[in-house]
Image (cartoon, rainbow, N blue to C red):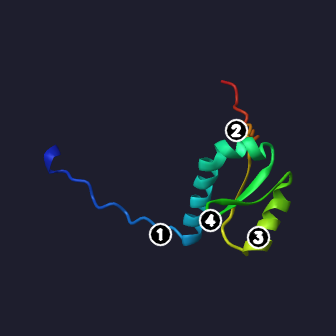
Amino acid sequence: MTVSEITAGPSPPRPPVSPDREKWEREQHAFFRLLGSLLATHRGQYVAVHNGAVVASGPDLVQVALQAYAEHGRQPIYVDLVTDHPPPAAHMPHYRQPTSPG
């Protein structure tokens, strides 16, 4: 068999994306699209984005989320901190197996 005779097999089917996941991703994209204007009005606060608009804001993540869910029901709503600095990298300690000498 020559290289020209080898073909790729069919791609495995991709699992369907849930409507909730799609909506959450739309809200996340809306947050980043609005971020420039949010930095001027909500810097240092958490905001909840629903249907592409800010529906709640405040200094506490949990309170902002609860307020948004109370007003709009339990559905995908994106909540994030308005800042121009990315969060620090998380350090995840892990166990290392000691190596034996020699």
Is residue 26 something that shows in the picture?
Answer: yes
Q: Say if mark 1 contacts mark 2, CB within 8 Å.
A: no
In the picture of the structure, the residue carrying the numbered disc 3 is: 69
Numbered disc 1: secondary structure:
loop
Image coordinates of residue 20 in percent, x first then y, are 59, 70
Identify whether 77 is placed above or below 74.
Answer: above
Q: CA distance from mark 3 to mark 1?
A: 26 Å
Q: Say if mark 4 contacts mark 1, CB within 8 Å.
A: no
Identify whether 68 is placed above or below 42.
Answer: below
In the image, farthest residue toward the bottom:
73
For the residues carrying marks 1 and 2, which lies nearer the camera in this image? 2
Name which of mark 4 and mark 1 comes first in the sequence: 1
Q: Say if mark 4 contacts mark 2, CB within 8 Å.
A: no
Identify whether 31 is placed above or below 66.
Answer: above
Q: CA distance from mark 4 to mark 2?
A: 24 Å
The amino acid type of the residue labelled 2 equals: Pro
Numbered disc 2: secondary structure:
loop
